[in-house]
């Protein structure tokens, strides 16, 4: 299966106070979309079968390469929604996938955020950008040769320009829109004073997230500082801290190798620097639904996903290998007792369990002949001295065996292969490989269905695997337990003396680390209100969503996206502007909305993997 | 100021702890605190290979892990295929013993000479009514054995035992005469009195012992040199033991719901009550 897929594993929980960013890849929760306003069809994400609202299952940052789509590569987020109603989760209409993307030039032109190109030779001058920005991006362009993060830029000019930028950003963030969205202006999203979320941004399927995030945090650092109003000299200590953190993070992320999938596609490009038109230090703001979008919206437990390449061979744990070795030794001992056959050494020699060395085919026929002769000798001797009257032939006379496929009664062979592949890394939640081969438990692969909108071929992009469900259940039960625990603690604290409110309660975690609970519990002093996590209706909604997810019995779900990434919605937007001749401000608003297109979803049911004739 | 949010909230798991949510001061977003959980999705632990926790892949596996299913017999009753070998390990645990019956090389003729692979036959059983047989071909012996163990555990079947004569003491032999066939080999298992022992060839004898049968007469026919077929025929015969309707099974069974339909509330605490009623049998 080529190219190697990138697997998504469950990472840590999404903290309540973290800054949402559409660059993060996560499971559950509410969607974090690029742009400043909701896309047009966002409210109509309902199940086609039962018309209930769908819950977001997976959201992944899935950027595209410049080679495929030209310079104007949009920022793209892939979302997969599933139905949690009873009896509905496994049918084809109950899962829908969308890709939400935002062309970058639109955003930059209208929010005045500069685009910093790491390619040193061509600074990008944006249409509609002011002279300040031109200067800055030219300066940044030239300086990035020396240091990606522009640390060599002169202090004063940068300060002044950043101040202008941040003022503009602040202005635009007050445009009419969702209250929460207004908060997510550029300075806020990547704001350093809001806590560094450089690590969050890096959890994505795209490859250039490293540089993007690095650039973002630094600029965010600069801008964030300026929004706090400090006009003091640029403090290099903070910049150093930022650089170190990003360097550490990027070292960690070198292991993700999520760029494999993209580099495979764009191998003609020399260095990875040139390929990265994408890493826009644009600070595309993130929109988070709130208010009326959240009524009756089922929400699944939320945690991040981190990406790793798929391992090539089986990962057997040490006790298993030890056990296998013991079995082999016992077997050989028994064989030796039986007849002292010469083929014992052959197994010993070839059974390198530690080194995983397989038998060389170039050894030629000699050992094999010896083995066969040995077997024949064995047969002869055993038959003469046979004592089992009833059975006749001794057990050493194994003859006529041929290669045989693995078979289990009641299961299809293709499912067994699928399960073996899954066993390579049994905790994989998501597989991502745009244009790669998907892992399907049936022999017949999915039929080729072209994109509905543009009739281009659709490529496999993402696949969700069943360990995700188990992890969702785990997350949900842990969260509910903790909520129950917190609410019980809360009641105790309320009953006891209020002045000793800082009594810290310690509880021991499953893995032995203790957490102190008191202070955070007392921060939520609205027990019983619907926004509190301890309130019964929130818990019951959460439980219902998680239960619905737990009852899914699909085997895997695949998402196929249009290979050309067509944007019909975008054209609609453009034509709307022309025909109706709306004012510029309204057009600006329109362009703050991302495009929202639907992709194809295929479900493999568990029951379809059974072979019914053998079951009893 | 830059480091303020790093240590406090990023309560991750394993080595990836500091990748979690960063502390921000900009108030609530979304639906309130989802909690940090006590053990939950883990961070990267790919380096650890010693104790791998089972993450179930199938709905049945999830039910088993949560303790909603009390015994293997519930699974057998509804003829649900066992797609994960860890389900079997969960119920039988250390009682399940495995043994390699045979490893043999098989060849395939290619343009570049012979390609040799190893075929492993593994039999698992708990010596008390469950037995499984697995066959796997692989390029390395260890891989073949490992794969065969997994296949054997997935094909575990219950074996019904009965009495030869008086129903005193525990069951010790096959309940009726059973015939199993594979290829050209047929084996017939005949009930034997207590103390007769298993009268069979060495390899099928191992299978019968692992099933928990103490006494049995056998009679076989066909090309028994193909030991693979012989062993499979024995296994098929044992699997048929519960398919045979005998008079003591004439009592009406109470039909209960399949576990997949019965347990739909995954987040409820497991109830450690009496197991659900299923057809009682002469175990």
Image (cartoon, coloured by chain):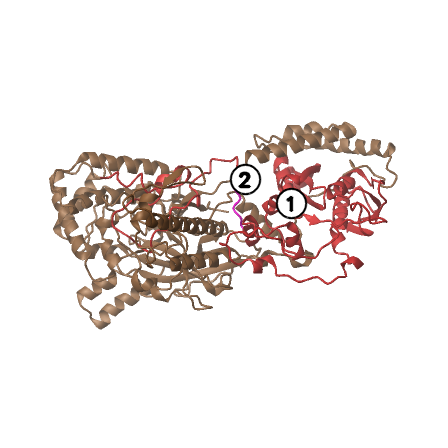
Labels 2 and 1 in the same subunit: no
Q: Secondary structure at mark 2?
A: loop
Locate the C terminus of chain A by quadrant: bottom right
Q: Position of residue B221 (x, y in %)?
A: 84, 47
Residue under label 1? B153
**Dot in front, 2 or 1:** 1
Dividing the picture into quadrants, the one containing residue B245 is bottom right
- In the displayed structure, would residue A49 be above or below residue A242? below
Residue A521 shown left or right of residue A159 in the figure: right
Does the rendering let one see residue A86? yes
Q: Is residue B56 magenta?
A: yes
Q: Position of residue A143 (x, y in %)?
A: 20, 39
* Shade representing chain A: brown
Q: Position of residue A305 (x, y in %)?
A: 40, 47
User: Contact, CB < 8 Å: mark 2 with mark 1?
Assistant: no
Q: Which residues are magenta?
A: B53-57
Does the rendering let one see residue A275? no
The residue lying furthest to the bottom in this view is A580
Q: Residue at x 27, y 48 (%)?
A: A280
Name the residue nearer the viewer: B151 or B112: B151
* Shade representing chain B: red
């Amino acid at each position: 299966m080529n190219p190697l897929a990138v697997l998504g594993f469950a990472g840590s929980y999404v903290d309540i106070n973290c800054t949402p960013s559409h660059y993060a890849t996560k499971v559950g929760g509410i969607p974090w979309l690029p742009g400043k306003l909701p896309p047009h069809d966002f409210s109509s994400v309902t199940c086609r079968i039962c018309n209930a609202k769908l819950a977001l299952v997976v959201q992944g940052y899935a950027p595209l390469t410049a080679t495929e789509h030209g310079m104007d590569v949009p920022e793209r987020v892939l979302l997969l929604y599933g139905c949690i109603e009873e009896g509905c989760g496994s049918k084809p209409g109950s899962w829908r996938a969308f890709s939400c993307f935002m062309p970058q030039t639109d955003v930059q032109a209208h929010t005045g955020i500069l685009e910093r190109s790491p390619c040193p030779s061509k600074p990008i001058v944006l249409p509609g950008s002011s002279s300040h920005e031109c200067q800055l991006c030219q300066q940044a362009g030239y300086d990035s040769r020396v240091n990606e993060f522009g640390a060599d830029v002169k202090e004063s000019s940068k300060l002044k320009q950043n101040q202008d930028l941040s003022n503009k950003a602040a202005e635009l963030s007050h445009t009419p829109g969702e209250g929460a969205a207004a908060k997510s202006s550029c300075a806020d999203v990547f704001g350093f004073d809001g806590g560094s979320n450089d690590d969050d941004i890096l959890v994505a399927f795209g490859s250039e997230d490293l540089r993007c995030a690095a650039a973002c945090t630094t600029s965010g650092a600069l801008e964030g500082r300026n929004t706090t109003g400090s006009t003091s000299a640029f403090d290099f200590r903070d910049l150093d801290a930022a650089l170190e953190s990003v360097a550490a993070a990027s070292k960690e992320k070198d292991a993700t190798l999520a760029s494999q999938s993209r580099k495979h596609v764009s191998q003609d490009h020399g260095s990875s620097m040139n390929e990265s038109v994408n890493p826009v230090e644009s600070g595309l703001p993130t929109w988070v639904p709130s208010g009326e979008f959240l009524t009756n919206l089922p929400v699944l437990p939320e945690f991040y996903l981190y990406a790793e390449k798929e391992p090539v061979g089986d990962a057997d744990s040490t006790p298993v290998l030890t056990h296998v070795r013991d079995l082999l030794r016992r077997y050989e001992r028994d064989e030796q007792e039986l007849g002292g056959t010469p083929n014992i050494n052959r197994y010993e020699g070839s059974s390198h369990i530690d080194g995983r060395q397989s038998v060389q085919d170039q050894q030629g026929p000699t050992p094999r002949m010896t083995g066969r002769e040995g077997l024949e000798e064995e047969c002869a001797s055993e038959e003469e001295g046979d004592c089992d009257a009833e059975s006749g032939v001794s057990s050493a006379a194994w003859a006529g065996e041929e290669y045989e496929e693995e078979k289990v009664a009641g299961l299809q062979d293709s499912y067994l292969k699928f399960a073996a592949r899954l066993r390579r890394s049994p905790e994989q939640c998501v597989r991502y490989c745009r244009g790669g081969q998907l892992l399907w438990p049936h022999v017949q692969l999915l039929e080729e269905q072209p994109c509905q909108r543009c009739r281009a071929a659709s490529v496999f992009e993402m696949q969700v695997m069943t360990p995700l469900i188990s992890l969702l259940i785990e997350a949900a039960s842990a969260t509910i337990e903790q909520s129950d625990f917190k609410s019980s603690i809360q009641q105790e604290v309320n009953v006891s003396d209020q002045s000793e409110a800082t009594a810290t309660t310690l509880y021991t975690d499953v893995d032995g680390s203790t957490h102190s609970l008191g202070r955070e519990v007392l921060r939520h002093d609205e027990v019983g209100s619907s926004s509190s996590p301890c309130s019964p209706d929130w818990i019951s909604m959460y439980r219902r969503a998680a239960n619905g997810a737990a009852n899914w019995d699909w085997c895997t779900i695949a998402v196929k996206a249009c290979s050309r990434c067509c944007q019909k919605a975008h054209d609609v937007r453009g034509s709307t502007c022309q025909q109706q001749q709306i004012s510029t401000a309204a057009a600006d608003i329109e362009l703050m909305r991302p495009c929202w297109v639907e992709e194809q979803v295929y479900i493999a049911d568990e029951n379809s993997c059974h072979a019914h004739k053998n079951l009893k | 100021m830059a480091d303020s949010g790093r240590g406090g909230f990023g309560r991750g798991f394993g080595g990836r702890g500091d990748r979690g949510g960063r502390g921000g001061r900009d108030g609530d977003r979304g639906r309130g605190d989802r909690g940090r959980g006590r053990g939950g999705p883990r961070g990267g632990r790919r380096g650890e290979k010693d104790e791998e926790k089972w993450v179930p892949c199938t709905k049945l596996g999830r039910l088993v892990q949560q303790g909603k299913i009390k015994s293997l017999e519930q699974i057998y009753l509804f003829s649900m295929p066992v797609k994960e070998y860890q389900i079997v390990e969960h119920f039988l645990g250390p009682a399940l013993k495995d043994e390699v019956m045979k490893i043999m090389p098989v060849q395939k003729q290619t343009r570049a000479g012979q390609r040799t692979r190893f075929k492993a036959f593994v039999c698992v059983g708990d010596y008390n009514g469950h037995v499984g047989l697995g066959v796997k071909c692989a390029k390395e012996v260890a891989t073949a054995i490992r794969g065969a163990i997994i296949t054997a555990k997935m094909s575990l079947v219950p074996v019904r035992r009965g009495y030869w004569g008086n129903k005193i003491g525990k069951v010790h032999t096959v309940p009726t005469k059973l015939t199993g066939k594979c290829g050209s080999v047929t084996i017939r298992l005949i009930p034997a009195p207590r103390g007769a022992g298993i009268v069979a060839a060495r390899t099928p004898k191992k299978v019968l012992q692992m099933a928990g049968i103490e006494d049995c007469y056998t009679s076989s026919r066909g090309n028994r040199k193909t030991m693979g077929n012989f062993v499979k025929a024995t296994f098929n015969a044992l699997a048929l033991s519960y398919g045979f309707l005998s008079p003591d099974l004439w009592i009406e069974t109470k039909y209960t719901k399949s576990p997949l339909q019965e347990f739909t509330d995954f987040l409820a605490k497991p109830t450690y009550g009496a197991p659900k009623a299923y057809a009682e049998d002469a175990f």
